[in-house]
Amino acid sequence: MSEPNAHQPARAPSHAQERIFVALDTPDLAHAAKLARALRGAVGGVKVGKELFTAQGPDGVRAVSGGERLFLDLKFHDIPNTVAGAVRAAVHLRPFMLSLHASGGRAMMQAAAEAAREAAEDAEAPRPRLIAITLLTSLDEADLETLGQRGPVSEQVKRLAALARDSGLDGAVCSPREIEALRALCGPDFTLVVPGIRPAGAAPGDQKRVMSPAEALQAGADYLVIGRPITGQADPLAAARQIAEEISQASGGVS
């Protein structure tokens, strides 16, 4: 695994809200920036994905992140040289985490890890944590079968997470249902980023494998990616604070 980054926090953040990355899944820059400003201090960072990045580009990402921790969730997947170039370019946005598909293979992930290290050194910037996408959380057993991939889902996720770890990546995005298995397989220092988080009473949306914030943290998650249960509420700040309180209680009173 690539060397740890001194700019990165320990695996277990000291404050409950630091566990939360709010997903800004909108092409509307003004709306995304307004949400980010409103939630500053109540969450640990923002997740920007393809929708906002495609609509607004790197300048839009900078405007939204505003110096806060950034999970740049672009899920790179291409030949090794192309992904390495994309990672080098992304380092200039100073993301805290950056995602790529483990299904791109060992050579692609190794090239990405080396590119991240070199680009961070050249730019005198923090090296982003490279986070593998194993299987999208919208996929279930039936979807895997239609793709011609060997199941069950849990075994495919473990295979790809282990490959990512062995290829020099820092962690993986995983469904809540895979947290315990990946923590046991990949060890305590492998960062687990978990979407599919739904507080009590929230609709599952298009996520097929969901869990509450408390359950995910008790299972061993490091960071939670939460979108609509915060951004879709009439008062996003109150929603974020309520989730942080649930996290605090689940963590034994972490502030």
Image (tube, rainbow, N blue to C red):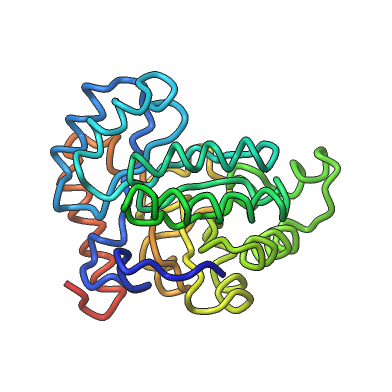
Quadrant in the picture for the N terminus? bottom right
Is 33 rendered above or below residue 212?
above
Tell whether 141 sits left or right of 132: right
Q: How many marks?
A: 0
Which of 198 and 66 lies nearest the eye of the viewer? 66
Quadrant in the picture for the C terminus? bottom left
For the point 17% across and 30% down, the residue is 34
Residue 195, x across and y down, in percent: 46, 51
The residue lying furthest to the front in this view is 122
Which of 195 and 210 lies nearest the eye of the viewer? 195
For the point 40% across and 56% down, the residue is 127
Is 110 rendered above or below residue 250?
above
Residue 166, x across and y down, in percent: 66, 68
Is 146 rendered above or below residue 255?
above
Tell whether 41 sits left or right of 171: left
Residue 240, x across and y down, in percent: 22, 50
Locate residue 237: give its quadrant.
top left
Residue 192, x across and y down, in percent: 48, 64
